[in-house]
Image (cartoon, rainbow, N blue to C red):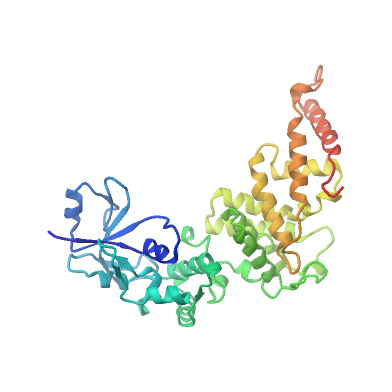
Amino acid sequence: MTYRVYLVGGAVRDGLLGLKPRENDWVVVGAQPEDLLEKGYRQVGASFPVFLHPGTSEEYALARRERKEGHGYHGFAVDFHPDVSLEEDLLRRDLTINAMARDSSGELVDPYGGQKDLENRVLRHVSPAFCEDPLRVLRVARFAARLAPLGFTVHPETVGLMRGITESGELAHLAAERIWTEVLRSCGALNVLLPEVDALFGVPQPEKYHPEIDTGLHVTMAMNLAAREAWAPEVVFALLLHDVGKALTPQSELPSHIRHEQRGVPLARRVCERLKAPNVYSDLALKVTGMHLRCHRLSEMKPATRLKLLEDVDLLRRPELLENFTRACEADYRGRGGFEDRDYPQAKILADVLEAALAVKVRDLDTEGLKGSQIGNLLRAARVEAIAGIADPAG
């Protein structure tokens, strides 16, 4: 049987934007599974019509129609009969900028105006069927965040459809693994997916330390700064949760010995468990939530207190955590009105403190006659002495 192959989706979109495509995805029109299996393609999954190319391992999907029959993103009946057209396949996609294709000669196929929306920097739904898949709320959030530096905005009608998905209760049917990285507040999804973070909007902060006043705005500014710097996604996730303790009680009402970091750690842990965040994300989020203010105060700390911070962050055993921990703390510090361009010398201080502490080895100490905890105490004392010799960058 004769069939036709088209490059689709992100590769076409990114090519028109002048960006390097991350991967190539293909749609095959007019074929049956047996046609690809006979050529050595390997099917992915038992019932879904996606195949891996025997040479490149790129994904080739049979053109398909979808019909909504149940809740969530699994609630679809899929038809991948050979008579499904390319236009029907593209119609089921989320955004017009993702509903374009190129044929074997490189000719653009754009039935829904994706190229024009790229030129106008608009994220727009392809059809009313957008409402049938709650995952699209999160996908649009991801595209909006990724393409915002290029001037893209979400079309008001698309935001309205996203709000409708939220109000329908469909978001509750998303699996936890699919929602932990992406949220969008403007359509009400944040209140459903992360109420702990949504509660931060409108919570006041002391103007002396936060000219932007609103805690939710501060969290947004810190995350945006980390994203602009292209820091690791786990840093951005940590910043999403780092101030959740502020929603419980205004800081002026907290007892002096109970700060928002202490109140926030159990909340952040609950969010990570509910969203099934990978360990590398949850571990950093809990450390930043509980210790970012301690990092800010490094220049005021005594050597023993600095060593205690190293121990609590687990940097002596896992020095590879240093970069992401200090970057998250820096984004918290600079993610405030008027602070965006300020230096954060604490990052160098902590790096120097860690280097000095790690340079002290048990083998270099006189441990004759000592056992167990005595050796540990000697090692700690030597590390405190080494840290005391560090000069702060500010002098």
Give the x, y percent position of residue 167. 49, 78
Nearest the eye: 291 or 11? 11
Does 222 appear above or below 38?
Answer: below
Does 162 appear above or below 301?
Answer: below
- Classify residue 336 by image quadrant: bottom right
Residue drawn at point x = 44 percent, y = 75 percent? 119
Residue drawn at point x = 63 percent, y = 62 percent? 223
Give the x, y percent position of residue 311. 73, 41
- Classify residue 361 by image quadrant: top right
Q: Outermost residue, left direction?
A: 1
Does 211 appear above or below 296?
Answer: below
- Classify residue 339 by image quadrant: bottom right
Residue drawn at point x = 40 percent, y = 62 percent? 15
Residue drawn at point x = 37 percent, y = 80 percent? 128
Inspect this view and state whether residue 375 appears. Answer: yes
Q: Is residue 219 left or right of residue 12?
A: right
Q: Is residue 277 left or right of residue 72?
A: right
Give the x, y percent position of residue 1. 12, 59
